Image (spheres, helix red, strand yellow):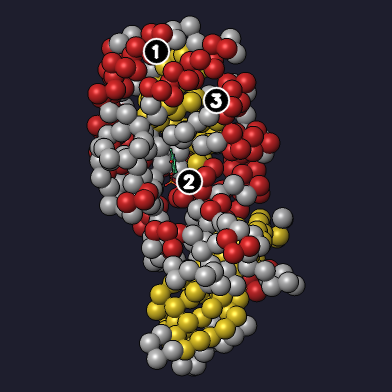
Amino acid sequence: MSYGYQGGELGLFSGQKFLALRTLVAKDEAPTYVYDLDDIVNRTERLKAAFNQQVTVHYAMKANHNLAVLKTLAQVGIGVDVVSGGEIDLALRVGFPPSRIVFSGVGKTRREIQLALQHKICQINVESPGELRRIGEVARAQKTVAPVALRFNPDVNPETHPYIRTGFRENKFGMDASFFPEVQTVLGQFKDCLKLVGITLHIGSQLRDVSPLLEAVRKSIPWFQRWQEAGHQLSTFDVGGGLGIDYHSGNSEGELRAVEAYARGLLELLKPVGGRILCEPGRILVARAGVLLCQVQYLKETPYKRFAIVNTGMHHLLRPALYEAYHRILPLRESSGAEVKTYDVVGPICESADVLGHDRPFAGLQEGDWLAVMDSGAYGAVMSSHYNLQAPPREVAIRSGEVIS
Ligand SMILES: Cc1ncc(COP(=O)(O)O)c(C=O)c1O
């Protein structure tokens, strides 16, 4: 267990130590993301064990690019999946070797491709024939050979929010089999500077049922084989990310068991195919490790609703506003015996979408109380904005019960 209550206080359990989250509140009472680095290490090790060391893990940096988080993951010895020049720079700065960097993303600029090739990263995941041509041109100009993997769109429609569904035929991502001739032509035109090393896919995020993930891999195998038959020595099969967590519960055993079932299915499916398997998990590694601490500024009651107005909101954690995502919201101090009332927990932003949670029960909630928005380690701080000229959230990383940054 990572976060939980002891003596009525919400805190972080670390071995025999208990760190009350209240002690991490800064003097200026700024909203604060807390990251439990030990939890990230434990989950990464558990994922590696589930894959029986047969899958190379590339953490999807887009989920959380906090420096302490990234350095921790680099030290665990896994790779990283990046989607911009900024992420390439940061990956190198925190110690990921270029040979462990995969470059994904649908809109790579010339400048970003130059950077990737200059640092000789291990693989560029390609989304369209136009992008492949551009990579060829840049590689030729730099007198180098670009290692590329072709992203397949398997046309599966998993149960998740439409905004985080990426492997359906109507999405902008990847290529289906109809792209084969055009891609083959471009590969032929740039034989001297493009090396096709593998295929890649990613069908979406926050998938609680792993069967669409496996279905997508199954549907991608012919794409892999077709390129091999066309004379390319493919060495990597990148299955992307997408593993989800149970945002409604503090118990993560169910989602970890789903990971294990996925790993078994994946290894079974890809055994006859050959090639090194890569994956790009983001959320499953870091979501549980993060909480967002915020303070109740005002309690407001109308004839229709009760509101707890806090000092954080959609500018720090966009997921509820953007995806109608659910996060548990817990008080830092339990108050037993007091009357339970339900509140919409809302932020200060001038938008009615600025709601962190609807109809949440709290006992004896008061102005000045602190709350924790749970499981906010993935797609939290990274998606924050300055909207309404609000200050960014503070971020604090904890290792072995000690604040390290
Ligand atoms: C190409 C790619 N790989 C990996 C990921 C990580 O997904 P998740 O955090 O769901 O594991 C994403 C997320 O959108 C992605 O676009």
Q: Residues within 10 Å of mark 3 (few under 14, many from 20)?
A: some
Q: Position of residue 255 (x, y in %)?
A: 38, 54
Q: How far is disc 1 from disc 3 in space, using C-alphas?
A: 18 Å
Residue highlighted by disc 1: 187
Regarding residue 59, the answer to whether it shows in the image is yes
Q: Do callouts 1 and 2 mark residues in contact (Cβ within 8 Å)?
A: no
**Amino acid type, mark 2:** Gly
Q: Please identify, in this view, whether the residue under mark 3 or under mark 2 is nearer the observer.
A: 3
Task: Say whether disc 3 or disc 2 marks the residue closer to the N-terminus.
Answer: 3
Q: Sequence-wise, which precedes: disc 1 or disc 2?
A: 1
Q: Quadrant of the C terminus?
A: bottom right
Rendered position, 181 above or below 52: above
Where does label 3 land, which residue? 110
Marks 3 and 2 close (CB-CB < 8 Å): no
- The quarter holding residue 361 reads bottom left
Question: Which element carries disc 3, helix, strand or loop?
Answer: helix
User: Which residue is nearer to you in this view: 273 or 150?
Assistant: 150
Identify the residue at horizontal 38%, vertical 22% (top origin): 129
**Callout 2 secondary element:** loop
Mark 1 C-beta closer than 8 Å to ligand 1: no
The residue located at (65%, 74%) in the rendering is 22
Query: Does mark 2 have its CB less than 8 Å from ligand 1?
Result: yes
